[in-house]
């Protein structure tokens, strides 16, 4: 559904002379690249978890990479490092 709206927006802006269709496609591609890097780190910070050897690669809102791990008991909260 989102792709349909992006196509309609790109078509209408191109018809009005506002944006070329290639520019709208770049926005869509950048969101696909970001999603390929991993889930957002902000979604993990401070949430309860089960301790273990699991580390999750994630992406911060500014595009920097990070990794999240679960703190040892008694805390049992996700902590994420900023690798950018």
Image (cartoon, rainbow, N blue to C red):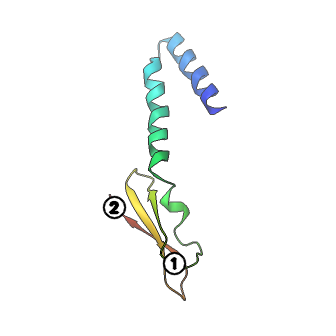
Q: Is residue 51 above or below residue 23?
A: below
Q: Where in the figure is residue 6, as x and y percent of width and height?
A: 58, 27
Q: Disc 1, disc 2: CB below 8 Å? A: no
In the rendered image, which quarter contains the C terminus? bottom left
Circle 1 Cα neighbour tier, 10 Å, few/some/many (<14 / 14–19 / ≥20):
few
Q: Where in the figure is residue 82, as x and y percent of width and height?
A: 37, 63
Q: Where in the figure is residue 45, as x and y percent of width and height?
A: 51, 68
Give the number of callouts. Answer: 2
In the rendered image, which quarter contains the N terminus? top right
Give the residue at mark 2. 83
- On the question of residue 19 being in view, the answer is no
Q: Earlier in the sequence, mark 1 or mark 2?
A: 1
Q: Is residue 84 above or below residue 27?
A: below
Q: Is residue 73 above or below residue 34?
A: below
Name the element at disc 2.
loop
Name the element at disc 1.
loop
- Identify the disc placed on residue 52: 1
Instruction: Name the residue rendered at 47%, 46% in the picture.
Output: 36
* Front position in the image: 69 or 41: 69
Toward the left, the furthest residue is 84
| Left or right of 83 on screen, residue 79 | right
- Identify the disc placed on residue 60: none
Q: Where in the figure is residue 58, as x and y percent of width and height?
A: 46, 58
* Front position in the image: 47 or 9: 47
Instruction: Name the residue rendered at 45%, 53% in the picture.
Output: 61
Toward the front, the furthest residue is 53
Instruction: Name the residue rendered at 49%, 39% in the picture.
Output: 32
How far is mark 1 from mark 2, CA to CA?
Answer: 21 Å
């Amino acid at each position: 559904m989102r792709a349909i709206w992006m196509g309609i927006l790109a078509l209408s802006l191109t018809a009005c002379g506002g944006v070329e269709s290639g520019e709208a496609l770049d926005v869509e591609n950048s969101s696909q690249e970001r999603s390929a890097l991993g889930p957002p780190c902000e979604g993990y910070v401070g949430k309860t978890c089960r301790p273990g050897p699991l580390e999750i690669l994630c992406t911060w809102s500014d595009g920097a990479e990070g990794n999240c791990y679960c703190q040892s008991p008694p805390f049992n909260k996700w902590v994420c490092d900023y690798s950018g």
